[in-house]
Amino acid sequence: QMSGTTPLVAGLATIQSLDGPAGYGPIVAFAFTCNMIIGAGVVGLPYGFYHGGLVLSAGFLAFCSVLVYTTMGYLIEVTGRAEGWANSEIIHDLVGDVVQYPPNFHCKRKFEISQLCALFLPVKLSKNSIFRRFADVNGNIHPWRRAYEVSVSMYSFGAMWMYAAVCAGSLSLVIPLEFLRPDNVDFGEMCTVRPGYTLPAYCQDSYLFFLLMFTLVMLPMCLMDLSGQRRMQLMLTAFALLAIVTMIASIAVAIFTSPYLDVKSKPPYIQTAPLATISGFGKLFTAAIFSQLSHNGIPGFLSLMRDKGAARPVFRAAILVTLLLYLGLSILAGLYFGADIDPVVTHNWRTYFNNHQGYTPLWAEAISYMVLVFPVISCSAAFPLYVVSLATTLQAAIPCPPHRALLVERVIRTLLALVPIGCAALLRDVAKILEFNGLFGFIIAFFVPCMLQWRSVRFCQARWGPVCPSPYETWSSHLSVVGFVFACSVLFFGVSLYQTILDYMS
C-alpha cells in the first residue's frame, strides 16, 4: 500500500495543469525533442561507428534506439499512473473513502522524474533500522530518487561542459582572430586539437575568447522560460537537420566526383571500412547511448504538449529521424573518409572541398563553413535546454518559500550555466570525463524508467485490481518486456564500465 505517501501526492496534486490551447503542438514538441537528442553527440558518433565496424555499429545503434524509445514510453505511462494516483488521493481527501475503481489516468499535471521516484520507489524502513534518521515523515528513504538526481546532475553537467568546449573549439578553428595570430601561420590548421599535440598560446587565447562570447549569449537564453524559446528552437532545429542532411548529401556527391584520398582512379571513391570490430566496439558504446538520450527533458516536453496522447508518436518520430540521419552520416563518412575520419567529424570538412582542386568555389566554401559551424549551432540549441531541465529537477529537491521561488530558480540556472563553462575554460579535452559521465546515462535512460514502470504497475494493480488500464499502454508495457530491457541495460552497463576502466588504466 502507498498510504504513507499521501502528503507527497497531495503536494503534487496542486501543480498547475499545462494542458489546454496554450500548449505546444506536435511539430514544436518534435523540434524540442530533436534538439535535446541531437546536441553535439552526432559529431562524435561517426568516429566510434567506423572503429566499431559499419554493420555491427549500425545494428547496435538501431537496437539502442528501440530500447531508448521503449523507456521514453515508460515515463509517459508512469506519469499517467501518477496522475491517477493523485486523483484518487484527492477524492479520498474530499469524501473520506478509498477509491475502489481506476480513476482518470490522462496526464494533466507535470511530474518530475525525481518526484515519480519518490512516489513509486520508496523503501520502507523498520522502526529499529539504523537508517531511520535519514527517513522522511512516513518512515521511507528514497535511494532511487537520490540516485536519479545525482545521475542527471552529473550527466547534464558533463553534457554542458562538452557543449561549451566543442562550441568554443569549433569557433576557434573556423574564425581566425587576426589580433592573436602570428604572421604566416595557418590558424585553423594549427588550432586543430590532436592527441599528444600541444596547442600554441594564441590558440588557447582564441578558445577562451570564444568561450567568453558563448557565455554572453547563453546566459540570457538560460534565464528564459521554455515557452519563450518556441521560434528559436524551431529555427535551430531546422538548421541542425539541414546541416546533417548537407553533410550526408555532400559525401554522397563526393563519392562519385572527388576522392578524399587518391586511392582509386574511378568512382565510386570509397575506402575499405571494417564491418565488425570487437576490439574497437567500445568506442561506439557510450556514444551510441549518449546520441539518443533525452529522458531528463521528457516531463517538461510532456507538460507543454496540448495533446498528451501524441507524445509517443512525437518521440517515435524524433528517434526514427535522428536514427536515420545518424546511420546515413556515419556509414557514408566511414566509407569516404576511412581511417582519416576525425573524432569530431565536422572537422573533416575544413579541407574537404579543396583536397584535390586548385581552388575552392564560393559555394563550396559556404557549405564547408556551414558544416564547420554546425556544432556551434547545435550546442547553442541544446545548452539552455539542459540548464532549464536540470534547474527544474534540482529546484524540486530544494525546499524553498513560494515568494522566493523565482529568485532561487534564476540563481540555480545562472550557476548551472557558469560552472560547466568555467570547467571548459580549465580543460577542453573532456573525452575521458564524458566516457565516465556516460555511465550515468544508463541510470537515467534505462534503470530508473524500468523500475518506475515495474513498480507503478504493481502498485496500481494492488490498489485497483489486475485490470488497471492506462491510455498510454502498448505491447512494450508488459512486465516481461520491462525485464528484458532491464537485463539488456545491465549487460550494456557492465561492458561500458569495463571499457571505461580499461581506457583509464591505459
Image: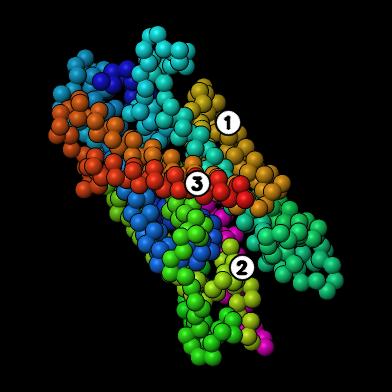
- As displayed, is residue 420 above or below residue 132? below
In magenta segment, residue 241 = no
Where are the magenta residues, as a range? 358-384
* Extreme residue toward the top, this view: 128
Q: Residue at x 18, y 38 (%)?
A: 469
In magenta segment, residue 371 = yes
Front-lying residue, 433 or 376: 433
- Residue 376, x across and y down, in percent: 60, 59
Q: Residue at x 52, y 57 (%)?
A: 283
The residue that mark 3 highlights is 498
Disc 1/disc 2 C-alpha distance (Å): 41 Å
Front-lying residue, 26 or 67: 67
Disc 3/disc 2 C-alpha distance (Å): 30 Å
Q: Quadrant of residue 81?
A: top left
Crowding around mark 3 (Cα neighbors within 10 Å: few <14, some 14 to 19, many 20+) is few
- As displayed, is residue 325 above or below residue 265? above
- As displayed, is residue 77 above or below residue 130? below
Whichever of callouts 1 and 2 sits on the residue coming sooner in the sequence is 2
| Amino acid type shown at disc 3 | Tyr
Q: Is residue 87 left or right of residue 416?
A: left
Q: Is residue 392 left or right of residue 172?
A: left
The residue that mark 2 highlights is 347
Whichever of callouts 3 and 1 sits on the residue coming sooner in the sequence is 1
- Residue 161, x across and y down, in percent: 61, 47
| Amino acid type shown at disc 2 | His
The residue that mark 1 highlights is 407
Q: Quadrant of residue 22?
A: top left
